[in-house]
């Protein structure tokens, strides 16, 4: 198996004894937060889950075991969850976004027991960054809820068939990076970009600096005509279950009605888990943009782990992509990660 594509759970750089000590330090610091009583009241049992040893360990790993940075990062996530209420997003709030199958959770896990989110940029069907992010958050929450107890990460499997630059925006991509890295640390195990065309390269060059190195290293470019692809995919996925577009044997297509039924069933289970009882009424979910909830004093990204973002000129990116697309070899080229 390609060593770069092995299961990517972050190895602890702290001894078990030190890890316990660091986890307790972060938890004690959170308990001293001036708004801790309000946070606990608003989050209820969710606060306990997010301050569990396993959860705090993820934040510590994301910040290289720096307790101060991990505490600030976790604090920001608790405030975000208190305001954005990701656990209360239901299927009916995002069904329109899901209609084309642009993002959905596969019905099976990979060989490491990780949830799989399939993404198809060509199926983008809306313009609202706010709505797109809400659906992404819903998918993240659902994927995490379905993880087995021994696993905490997921895989993103991105199909670039039929891709064009009109399918994506830098604004949505930046918000996606913010959500993933700041509020779901260590949840992404691997992101496979399957057959990305050469015209995607200018966009990737601009987006990559938004990613922390650890996250960027989890992004792998895989091409169906590469001699190693078959063994790579077989080492990660059950081929009889994997969709044929990714080299598998499963020829089933995305069925919105079937998927909607699955998500509604998951919602019912998830809300019993979060609330202790099922509720027939829809929770009130705020529709504010994600950026509204960023603490003004949060410096969790100021640790040198994220490169300074370049100036962005979307017209130049589009022009360069169009130039590449006009080239007869544009779609057959390889992108350097």
Image (cartoon, rainbow, N blue to C red):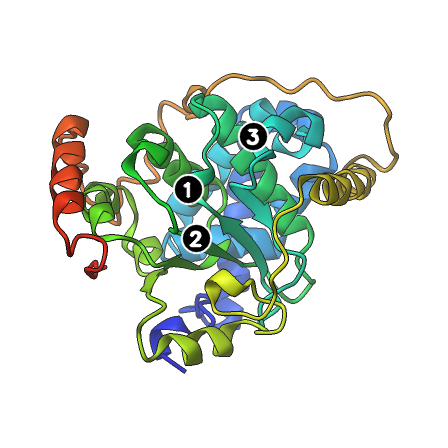
Tell which circle, 3 or 1, labels the residue nearer the N-terminal end. 3
Given residues 337 and 302, the one toward you in this image is 337
Disc 1 vs disc 2: Cβ atoms closer than 8 Å?
yes
Outermost residue, front side: 328
Tell which circle, 3 or 2, labels the residue nearer the N-terminal end. 3
Disc 3 vs disc 2: Cβ atoms closer than 8 Å?
no
Judge left or right: residue 17 versus residue 108: left
- Give the number of the disc on residue 121: 1
Please report the residue visible at 58 percent of the width from the left and 46 percent of the height from the top: 104
Q: Position of residue 288 (x, y in %)?
A: 51, 16
Given residues 86 and 16, the one toward you in this image is 86
Q: Considering the numbered disc 3 on the image, is that residue within a helix, a strand or a loop? A: helix
Tell which circle, 1 or 2, labels the residue nearer the N-terminal end. 1
Residue 217 visible in the shown view: yes
Q: Residues within 10 Å of mark 1 (few under 14, many from 20)?
A: many
Please report the residue visible at 18 percent of the width from the left and 44 percent of the height from the top: 325
Given residues 33 and 87, the one toward you in this image is 87
Given residues 286 and 139, the one toward you in this image is 139
User: Which of the 4 image quadrants contains residue 138?
Assistant: top right
Q: Position of residue 124 (x, y in %)?
A: 45, 34
User: Which of the 4 image quadrants contains residue 100?
Assistant: top right
Q: Position of residue 11 (x, y in %)?
A: 44, 70
Residue corresponding to mark 3 = 97
Q: Quadrant of the C terminus?
A: bottom left
Q: Check the image and report above or below for 133 versus 262.
A: above
Q: CA distance from mark 3 to mark 2?
A: 17 Å
Residue corresponding to mark 2 = 158
Residue 168 visible in the shown view: no
């Amino acid at each position: 198996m390609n060593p770069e594509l092995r299961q990517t759970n972050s190895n602890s750089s702290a001894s078990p004894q030190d890890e316990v000590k660091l986890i307790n330090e972060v938890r004690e610091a959170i308990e001293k937060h001036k708004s801790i009583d309000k946070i606990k009241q608003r989050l209820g049992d969710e606060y306990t889950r997010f301050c569990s040893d396993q959860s705090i360990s993820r934040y510590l790993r994301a910040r290289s075991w720096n307790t101060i940075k991990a505490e600030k990062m976790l604090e920001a996530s608790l405030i975000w969850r208190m305001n954005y209420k990701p656990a209360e997003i239901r299927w009916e709030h995002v069904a329109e976004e899901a209609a084309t199958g642009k993002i959905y959770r596969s019905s099976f896990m990979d060989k490491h027991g990780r949830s799989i989110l399939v993404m198809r940029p060509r199926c983008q069907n809306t313009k609202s960054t706010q709505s797109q992010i809400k659906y992404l958050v819903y998918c993240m929450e659902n994927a995490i809820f379905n993880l087995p107890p021994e696993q905490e990460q997921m895989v993103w499997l991105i199909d670039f068939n039929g891709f064009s630059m009109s399918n994506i925006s830098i604004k949505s991509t930046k918000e996606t990076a913010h959500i993933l890295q700041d509020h779901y640390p260590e949840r992404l195990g691997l992101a496979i970009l399957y057959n990305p065309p050469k015209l995607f390269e200018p966009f990737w060059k601009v987006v990559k600096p938004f990613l922390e190195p650890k996250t960027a290293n989890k992004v792998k470019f895989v091409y169906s005509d590469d001699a190693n692809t078959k063994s790579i995919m077989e080492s990660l996925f059950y081929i009889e279950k994997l969709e044929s577009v990714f080299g598998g044997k499963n020829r089933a297509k995305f069925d919105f009605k079937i998927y909607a039924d699955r998500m509604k069933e998951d919602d019912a289970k998830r809300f019993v888990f979060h609330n202790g009882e099922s509720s027939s009424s829809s929770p009130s979910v705020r529709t504010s943009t994600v950026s509204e909830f960023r603490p003004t004093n949060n410096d969790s990204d100021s640790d040198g782990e994220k490169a300074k973002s370049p100036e962005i000129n979307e017209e130049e990116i589009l022009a360069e992509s169009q130039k590449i697309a006009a080239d007869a070899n544009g779609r057959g080229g390889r992108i350097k990660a």
